[in-house]
Image (cartoon, rainbow, N blue to C red):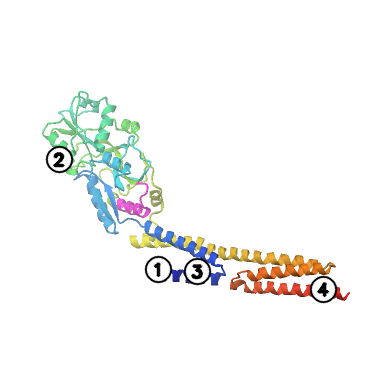
Amino acid sequence: METRRKIFFTRVQALFMEIFGLSRAAALSSVLLIGLFMIFAVYWFFHAAPPRTIIITSGPEDSIFRRDAEKYAKILARNGVKLKILPSQGSLENIRRLANPAFKVDIGFVQSGVSGSLDIDNLTSLGSISYEPLMVFYRSSQPLDLLSQLNGKRLAIGPEGSGTRSLALVLLAANGIEPGGATTLVDLDAGEAAKALLENRIDAAFLMGDAASPQVMRKLLQMPGIRLFDFMQADGYTRRFGYLNKLELPKGSIDFGKDIPAHDVSLIGPTVELIARADLHPALSDLLLEAAGEVHGNPSLFKHRGEFPAPLEHEFHLSPDASRYYKSGKSFLYRYLPFHLASLMNRILVVAVPMAVLLLPGLRIIPALYRWRIKLRLYRWYRALLILERALATRMAHEERKELLGRLDRIEEEVNKMKMPALFADQFYFLRGHIDFVRDRLRKRALLTEGD
């Protein structure tokens, strides 16, 4: 095997020497240069391929985040990409996982406003995918107008790691309610919080779409004695906290027959963003945004058709790939070819174009430089011949002519030692012919001088 490699390498080297007229060293350099370039191209070709499996951190079981992730998985599977779903407590745990380089995850659902002091420089947004209304259900005989009226009550604010808990603490603090005070803050997930509220073990529950299923929210809305908090100060909240949006639950939209809710209810809530690591493959970014359009593009209570996904920026910068997608859609190849075939063709083009632009001119430069070097060697001896020929124009003694003839012999000796590729054989023989020409002139000059 080793012998075959040596034979192949020797033949390639000889081919370069013959075609380009290169010396052994120049041919060897060219072969090594091309070899290194090809090795790099092959490495890049396989390294740049989009992975066939990516990981998403979603949300609790039965949450909207979890169900959306399962829809993404089905869409990506149609393109030969497997989406592995990791359950979580919600947005806060998702952003912590994404911000931790040691945690193996690629994308995740994150509500705006939960990053806090985390280092998110290595994260980018693929865009906002939905509004996430905060619903505060409470037990009371009379409607409450202010969140501060919950002071001293038993409140379920969501488990550690959830976006619900993060937002609830911010809103309660803005109303003078802090942990450790007269208010009891309970860390219950959505299902347990709804059950505790129905059993009168708590007075209010903060629930969001990433944790509570639509069935749980509908059950609470239809339960006598339990009310949905109407954020009459919604405009003030959205101005104080820029990542919040004012939303409206229309009258009767939950149950037209029972007119639930009995009036329009103002709500507040952040947007949910699809967050990715900055090194997410561009082709996967396009694929995920296409899936997001299919999953989140339909109308619902809090959005119009085609409103999401949208290039809205809050804490996270929109990725360049997502920005390009929102402006012009998928690239040409991915628009008309199956995903992996388009990826293959794209990588072939990316490898072939640099080879044509860089390698081919490089192969032309190497022979040009070598020819220039050979000509310099030849011109060196032509200069020596010119100096000798000028000396013939002057009268000289016998010893001087003998010395010139000796110099000419030394020039011829050095020229004959030159290793000359076949491509330059004509110029080499021309030089030797010119040496003989100068020698004849020198001898004729000597005969004339002796005749005088």
From mark 3 to mark 4, how far is it between C-alphas? 49 Å
State which mark lies toward you, 3 or 4. Answer: 4
* Residue 219 marker: 2
From mark 1 to mark 2, how far is it between C-alphas? 76 Å
From mark 1 to mark 3, how far is it between C-alphas? 17 Å
Q: Mark 1: which secondary structure?
A: helix
User: What amino acid type should be assigned to the residue bearing mark 2?
Assistant: Lys
Q: Mark 2 packing: few (<14 Cα in 10 Å), some, or many (20+)?
A: few
Q: Mark 4: which secondary structure?
A: helix
State which mark lies toward you, 2 or 3. Answer: 3
From mark 4 to mark 1, how far is it between C-alphas? 62 Å
- Which residue does the numbered mark 4 point to in the structure image? 446
**Chief secondary structure of the magenta portion:** helix
**Sooner in the amino-acid sequence: mark 1 or mark 2:** 1
Q: Are marks 3 and 4 in contact (CB under 8 Å)?
A: no
- Which residue does the numbered mark 3 point to in the structure image? 13
Q: Are marks 4 and 1 in contact (CB under 8 Å)?
A: no
* Residue 2 marker: 1
User: What amino acid type should be assigned to the residue bearing mark 4?
Assistant: Ala
User: What amino acid type should be assigned to the residue bearing mark 3?
Assistant: Gln
Quadrant assignment, res 96: top left
* Residue 232 shows up from this direction: no
Q: Residue furthest front?
A: 399
Q: Seen in the image, is 419 located left or right of residue 151?
A: right
Q: Seen in the image, is 280 located left or right of residue 379?
A: left
Q: Residue furthest right?
A: 452
From mark 2 to mark 3, how far is it between C-alphas? 80 Å
Tell me which segment is drawn in magenta: 277-293
**Sooner in the amino-acid sequence: mark 2 or mark 3:** 3
Q: Position of residue 121 (x, y in %)?
A: 38, 41
